[in-house]
Image (cartoon, grey):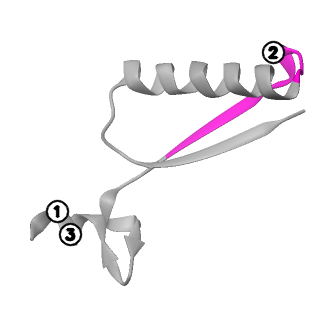
Amino acid sequence: MPIVDVSLVAGRTEAELRALITAVHDAVVTSLGVPGESVRVLVRELPPTHWAANDETIAERRSR
């Protein structure tokens, strides 16, 4: 059972997240040749204060 875990900064619409889930699901089915019902897609949304690169959060970067 393939499990795909996607982490994103919060802020996308429900429609955008739904499209992402469909695209990831279809890519896994096509590339691995597994049945669709076996694919799991997890989407985790994080606030921009909880995501950092090079010791700077996305919130800090956006506020510059």
Residue to which mark 2 is pinned: 36
Residue to which mark 1 is pinned: 62
Q: Residue at x 31, y 59 (%)?
A: 48
Q: Residues within 10 Å of mark 1 (few under 14, many from 20)?
A: few
Residue to which mark 3 is pinned: 61
Which mark identifies residue 18? none
Element assignment for label 2:
helix
**55 in relation to 20, above or below:** below
Q: Specify whether residue 16 is painted magenta.
A: no
The reply to whether dot 3 and dot 2 touch (C-beta < 8 Å) is: no
**2 in relation to 50, above or below:** above
The reply to whether dot 1 and dot 3 touch (C-beta < 8 Å) is: yes
Q: Residue at x 63, y 28 (%)?
A: 24
Q: Residues within 10 Å of mark 2 (few under 14, many from 20)?
A: some
Magenta residues (range): 33-44
Q: Position of residue 44 (x, y in %)?
A: 53, 45
**10 in relation to 48, above or below:** above
Q: Amino acid at mark 1?
A: Arg
Cα gap from disc 1 to disc 2, whole angstroms:
38 Å
Q: Residue at x 39, y 66 (%)?
A: 50
Cα gap from disc 3 to disc 2, whole angstroms:
39 Å
Query: Which quadrant holds the N terminus?
Result: top right
User: Which residue is at the front of the view, 12 or 24?
Assistant: 24
Q: Say which quarter of the image contains residue 10.
A: top left
Q: Specify whether residue 36 is painted magenta.
A: yes
User: Which residue is at the front of the view, 32 or 1?
Assistant: 32
Q: Residues within 10 Å of mark 3 (few under 14, many from 20)?
A: few
Q: Say which quarter of the image contains residue 11.
A: top left
